[in-house]
Structure formats: C-alpha cells, structure tokens
Amino acid sequence: MDELNQHLTGDIHAVTAANNLLAAAIDSRTFHEVTQSDKALLNRLCPPNNNR
C-alpha cells in the first residue's frame, strides 16, 4: 500500500489544478459573453479582414 500511495501523491494536486483552470476559463468566457453585444463578440472572435 505504501508503494501505491507514493505514486499517487501528485495526482490529486494535478487534478485539482486542472479543475480550477477549467472553471476559470468557463467563468471568464461566460462573463465576456454576457457583458458584450453579439456584434462586438463576433468582431473579437472573427476580426474583419481589411486587406480585401
């Protein structure tokens, strides 16, 4: 059992960090979608090509 516990000690931290990063990304995306108009969000995601 000691050998198993030695190998899993960093895994919980990695899963927690990944979960926090995903939650922050979802929170940020939701905030920006709610606070901007559809046209502003579209222009930010797909900037118009002015070279034509």
Image (cartoon, rainbow, N blue to C red):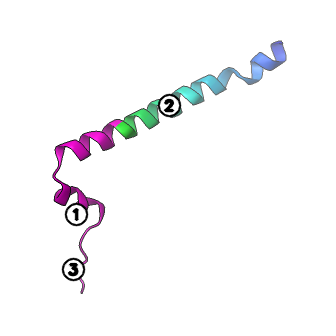
Residue found at the very far front of the displayed protein: 38
Q: Which residue is mark 1?
A: 43
Query: What percent of the width, then of the height, locates residue 23?
Result: 41, 33
Residue 38's place in the image compared with 7, above or below, is below
Q: Which residue is mark 2?
A: 19
Q: Main secondary structure of the magenta part?
A: helix
Q: Which residue is mark 3?
A: 50
Image quarter of residue 14: top right
Residue 42's place in the image compared with 21, above or below, is below
Determine the secondary structure under disc 1: helix
Which quadrant does the N terminus fall into?
Answer: top right
Q: Please, what is the three-letter code of the amino acid marked with disc 1? A: Asn
Q: Please, what is the three-letter code of the amino acid marked with disc 3? A: Asn
* Image mark for residue 24: none
Determine the secondary structure under disc 2: helix
What residue is rendered at 53% in x and 26% in y? 16
Along the line of sight, the residue nearer the viewer: 51 or 37: 37
Image quarter of residue 44: bottom left
Q: Is residue 7 left or right of residue 25?
A: right
Query: What percent of the width, then of the height, locates residue 10?
Result: 65, 25
Q: Please, what is the three-letter code of the amino acid marked with disc 2? A: Asn
- Disc 1 or disc 3, which is closer to the eye? 1
Query: What percent of the width, then of the height, locates residue 17?
Result: 51, 30
Determine the secondary structure under disc 3: loop
Query: What percent of the width, then of the height, locates residue 40?
Result: 18, 58
